Image: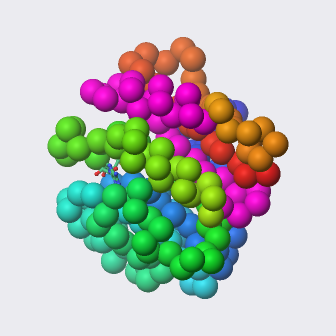
């Protein structure tokens, strides 16, 4: 059976993030991935979850309360500034970004290549060995194509001695289907 895109992203994270670790959600949105990461790291771990949009922060906050979750630091800031919120020595067990806009919300507030790439390269420095950074790339919206191209260009240049970079997606789906870019630190 082939995993759907979001199921595959979660499957990969499940394999690589362990209880007690610190995980990062670069795009909290409605909080689905934040809740998923919170369960993987458990009570002894913690999750840093970022979004620039108040509506997303509120929606994620409500989901955390509903699920009685207390190990998440929900931060209203650009994910490119993530270093401000972690200890100098901290190592990340894994991270996920769902790119694009918040479903059901303002479609002009979207992730952008410059800040996405700044965050991605910073996180790779902090990622544990064998850790994964997952990007779910939605690119059908305005600006999405540019972000997709910038990511493919930058990530395909990562040194293969240090990183494995996987692309996973369906070739025969209509309407610019999303795909996954998964970066594993060797
Ligand atoms: C596709 S949604 C995320 C969906 C989310 N993972 C979920 O499970 O519901 C993308 C989110 O990224 C946020 N965003 C856009 N640019 C950002 C940035 N530079 N830093 C942090 N969040 C950003 C948007 O506000 C939006 O909520």
Rendered location of residue 77, percent (x, y): 31, 63
Residue 145 lies within the magenta run = yes
Residue drawn at 48 percent across, 44 percent down: 117
Q: From the top left corner, tell me how far across and down residue 23 is, in percent.
A: 56, 67
Residue 184 painted magenta:
no
User: Whole-percent x and y of residue 150?
Assistant: 47, 30
**Looking at the picture, how far across and down is residue 59, in whole percent?**
26, 63
Side of 5 where 69 appears, left or right? left
Question: Residue 63 is drawn in which quadrant?
Answer: bottom left
User: In this picture, is 57 found above or below 19?
Assistant: above
Q: How is the image coloured?
A: rainbow
Q: Read off the magenta span.
A: 127-155
Would you place residue 23 above or below residue 148 in this image? below
Q: Which residue is drawn at 65% across and 33% down?
A: 157
Is 52 situated left or right of 124 in this image?
A: left
Task: Tell me the quadrant of the picture where the N terminus can be found.
Answer: top right
- Residues 35 and 93: in front is 93
Q: Residue at x 29, y 66 (%)?
A: 76
């Amino acid at each position: 059976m082939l995993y759907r895109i979001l199921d595959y992203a979660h499957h990969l994270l499940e394999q690589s993030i362990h209880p007690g670790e610190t995980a990062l959600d670069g795009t909290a949105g409605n909080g689905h991935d934040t809740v998923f990461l919170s369960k993987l790291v458990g009570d002894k771990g913690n999750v840093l979850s970022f979004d620039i949009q108040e509506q997303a922060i509120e929606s994620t906050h409500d989901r955390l309360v509903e699920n009685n979750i207390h190990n998440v630091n929900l931060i209203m800031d650009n994910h490119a500034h993530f270093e401000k919120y972690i200890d100098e020595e901290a190592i990340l067990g894994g991270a996920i970004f769902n790119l694009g806009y918040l479903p059901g919300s303002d479609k002009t507030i979207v992730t952008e290549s410059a800040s996405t790439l700044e965050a991605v390269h910073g996180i790779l420095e902090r990622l544990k060995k064998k850790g994964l950074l997952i990007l779910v790339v939605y690119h059908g919206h305005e600006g999405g194509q540019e972000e997709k191209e910038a990511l493919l260009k930058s990530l395909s240049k990562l040194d293969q001695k240090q990183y494995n970079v996987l692309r996973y997606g369906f070739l025969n789906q209509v309407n610019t289907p999303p795909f996954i870019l998964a970066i594993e630190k060797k």
